[in-house]
Image (tube, rainbow, N blue to C red):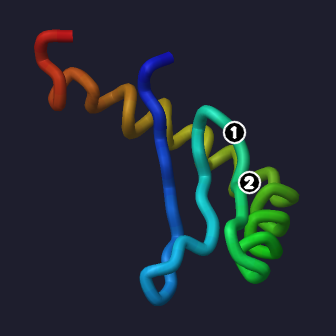
Amino acid sequence: NDIQLIYSAYYNKLEIFRFDSNVGKFVGYTEYGVKQAEYRNNNPSIIGGMRAQREGYCLHNVGNWYPNM
């Protein structure tokens, strides 16, 4: 539960949208980002893939990054 995956998209040093595994969906921060987040949240394959990234990438490598855990 302590492991969190955050995927952010930036343009011109401005965060457009973000996926947070604790929230479980994309959140938009600009007008364009809100549209992109809505598109991604309505696509089950994108949401499923991002949720699986936490399991496949973060939890798999936590022993490499923090060997004393």
Q: Amino acid at mark 1?
A: Gly
Looking at the rendering, which quadrant does residue 18 occupy? Answer: bottom right
Residue at left offset 17%, top offset 31%: 65
Residue 10 position (above or below residue 29): below
Image spot of residue 37 (x, y percent): 75, 65
Foreground pick, 45 / 27:
27
Measured in 3D between alpha carbons, the distance from the residue under mark 1 to the one under mark 2, in whole angstroms, is: 13 Å
Residue 13 position (above or below residue 26): below
- Graded by Cα atoms within 10 Å as few (under 14), some (14 to 19) or many (20 or more), the crowding at tag 1 reads some
Residue at left offset 43%, top offset 81%: 13
Image spot of residue 50 (x, y percent): 59, 48
Q: Nearer the viewer, mark 1 or mark 2?
A: 1
Q: Amino acid at mark 2?
A: Ser
Residue 9 appears left or right of 65: right
Looking at the rendering, which quadrant does residue 27 occupy? Answer: bottom right
Residue ID for mark 2: 45
Residue 18 appears left or right of 54: right
Residue 26 appears left or right of 42: left
Residue 4 position (above or below residue 69): below
Residue ID for mark 1: 24
Image spot of residue 11 (x, y percent): 50, 84
Residue at left offset 71%, top offset 65%: 28
Image spot of residue 44 (x, y percent): 80, 51
* Disc 2, SS: helix
Q: Mark 1 or 2 closer to N-term?
A: 1
* Disc 1, SS: loop
